[in-house]
Image (cartoon, rainbow, N blue to C red):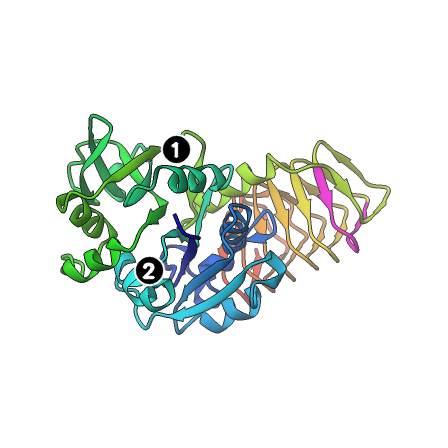
Amino acid sequence: MRDLKGLILSGGKGTRLRPITHTSAKQLVPVANKPVLFYGIEAMAESGIAEIGIIVAPETGNEIREAVGDGARFGVSITYIDQAEPLGLAHAVLTAEPFLGDSPFVMYLGDNLLQGGISDLVEAFRTSSPDALILLTPVPDPQNYGVAELRDGAVQRLVEKPAKPATDLALVGVYMFTPPIHAATRAIKPSERGELEITDAIQYLVDQGKRVEPHIVRGWWKDTGRLDDMLEANRLVLDTITERIEGELIDSHTEGRVVIEAGARLERSTVRGPAIIGAGADLVDCYIGPYSAVGDRCRIQNAEIENSILLADSSVVGLERRMQGSLLGKNVMIGRDDGQPRAYRFMIGDNSEVWIP
């Protein structure tokens, strides 16, 4: 099999993560202080893929270009591919055909995370040379995904978001294709929701007698399109970190696996891991609990935070009760006026300001 190319889908509107995504691409929302999109690029680089195309939307394309650059920092070459409207995954493949040419390729959804990367899967694809390889995983709510039906270990049928799923095997957001997929994307028609579905294109390959191999994923996989999924992905990634203290601790201490980036300053504060504190963050008289990711230059004072994600330049000051299960956008400010304390749960967009009575 000739050298593979990579295709990462970073279009879409991110409606399930609003208001965060009103002002930022959903693929750039960080997990453990690293944009979700970067994990996919790194996974491709680690698997030996040197040329990557990134599908971008008009609304967020410039932001993604600025964040990712030409790929040199990841050891790859990146080409940006404009998709005017998010008309389905198969439409993205169709849009990328000039870049892909006759190369086999790996398609990766830019807001997905897959435990352990894709190197082993890419090697299996190279070795067995099927027409397509799809990743599947059992899920409790298959009606929300593309679902595969297998027979004797082979793919027989794929259905996008079926009302009555025949199995619990959902398509994971990583696919491996050879050039016949291009004819498939041209042959199918839009679904009822007006999109060219990748499940229909793969079904076309099956119906044409092409060899479509399934691979059951046993590790974790996360689609980070919703708040709870973002927080769970953050927990899963933080569970893998190694302790590293490069910032300044004044009358402060850490417990467990904690990363304190250079330039961060902690005074009379406790950080209980796994957790990460970004560069230039300023923490005073506060407690940061497990599974928290505090972004660069955040300011936290007289507050307790746990199981939360704070994007860069946000401030949390003077909360008398713990903030948990929250996602704050960039440059958000949360403070507290005098009054009886209550429990807090926030999902707040960029450049916001909230004062709790």
Q: Nearer the viewer, residue 193 or 348?
A: 193
Q: Which of marks 2 and 1 precedes in the sequence?
A: 2
Mark 1 vs mark 2, CA separation in Å: 28 Å
Residue bounds of the magenta highlight = 258-267
Residue 155 in the image: x percent, y percent?
Answer: 21, 36
Q: Is residue 110 above or below residue 121?
A: below
- In the displayed image of the protein, which residue is found farthest to the right? 250
Q: Position of residue 141 (x, y in %)?
A: 28, 36
Q: Nearer the viewer, residue 340 or 98?
A: 98
Q: Is residue 258 left or right of residue 187?
A: right
Q: Which structural element holds mark 1?
A: loop
* Residue drawn at the location 53% of the way across and 47% of the way down: 344
Horizontal relation, residue 13 to residue 185: left or right: right
| Residue 253, magenta (yes or no) | no
Residue 196 can be seen in this image: no
In the rendered image, which residue does mark 1 sit on?
Answer: 217
Asked if the stretch drawn in magenta spans residue 262, the answer is yes
Q: Residue furthest top?
A: 152
Image disc number at residue 102: 2
Q: Nearer the viewer, residue 64 or 339?
A: 64
322 vs 106, left or right, is right
Q: Looking at the magenta stretch, what is its main secondary structure? A: strand
Q: What is the three-letter code of the residue carrying label 2?
A: Asp
Answer few, some or many: residues within 10 Å of disc 2's Cα (few below 14, many 20 plus, some between 14 and 19).
Answer: some
Eyeballing the image, is 303 above or below 196? above
